[in-house]
Amino acid sequence: DIQMTQSPSSLSASVGDRVTITCRASQGISTYLAWFQQKPGKAPESLIHAASSLQSGVPSKFSGSGSGTDFTLTISSLQPEDFATYYCQQYNTFPYTFGQGTKLEIK
Amino acid sequence: EVQLVESGGGLVQPGGSLRLSCAASGFIFSTYDMHWVRQATGEGLEWVSYIGTMGDTHYSGSVKGRFTISRENAENSLYLQMNSLTAGDTAVYYCARARPGIGGERWYFDYWGQGTLVTVSS
């Protein structure tokens, strides 16, 4: 199975900050990488697919990059509603696998 | 509006069975791949199973041989039959829709349901 490793596991930031979360795959997955946002008690929401393509309706403050094994999610100008847990997922090969999550907290 | 509504969760004893349902609306269900993903309390997301538009299936190693995914396109419904349940299967179970990427390769998740809680305990 492909292992997905996110870093950091948690991150404290302030409103207005720009943050970057990293996701590394244990083997190459081309650009078949998705990012999801999950708020407490809620279902995950899809943010990005194909490493850098925003889902419909997702604001442009979210951006993704990478290919192969190394990927990043960048969130600019943090707002209170952005503080959540973020997960990466590879969908190159079954079984699909998720990173362990990055909890973004308000400093 | 795309909607996915899971149901069928509840309390079940170890070794028992449960069947989850996911009712889909707002799109042509038969033309989309579907998945089940679960999340234990306080833990991360774990992919569970997939069913394609042609009925092809895949499972995670942790549920293979115990869980069966199916779909009934005429009823716009996705199912997950869970047998031989253990405490390790306790989680919120989400259904998710997948759509094709550019060129039709590697379908990615776009919509998720709100989840249904399965608790395995004596």
Image (spheres, rainbow, N blue to C red):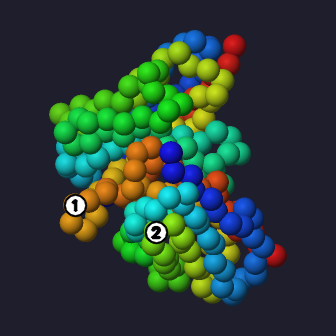
Q: Looking at the image, can residue B74 be seen?
A: yes
Vertical placement of A55 versus B10: above or below?
below
Kind of residue at badge 1: Gly
- A76 to B101, vertically: above or below: below
Q: Quadrant of residue B120?
A: top right
Q: Where is residue A20 in the image (x, y as percent from the top left)?
A: 64, 78
Horizontal and vertical percent for residue B3? 36, 50
Secondary structure at badge 1 equals helix
Res A68 label: 2
Identify the image quadrant of residue B73. Answer: top left
Q: Mark 1 points at which residue?
A: B104
User: Is disc 1 on the same chain as disc 2?
Assistant: no
Q: What residue lies at 44% left-to-right and 43% top-to-bottom?
A: A95
> Residue B58 at what x, y percent from top left?
36, 36
* Residue located at (48% from left, 17% from top): B83
Residue type of the residue flagged with mark 2: Gly
Q: Quadrant of the C terminus of chain B?
A: top right
In the image, residue A67 sits, relative to residue B81, either above or below, namely: below
* Residue at the front extreme of this rendering: A27
Residue A54 visible: no
In what quadrant of the picture does the N terminus of chain B appear? bottom left
Residue at coordinates 76% horizontally, 78% vertically from top-left?
Answer: A13
**CA neighbours of label 1 inside 10 A, class few (<14), some (14 to 19), many (20+):** few
Residue A79: which quarter of the image? Answer: bottom right
Comparing A68 with B21, the one in front is A68
- As drawn, the residue found furthest toward the right would be A107
Which mark's residue is nearer the viewer, 2 or 1? 2
Using residue A14 as the reference point, say whether residue A4 is left or right of it: left
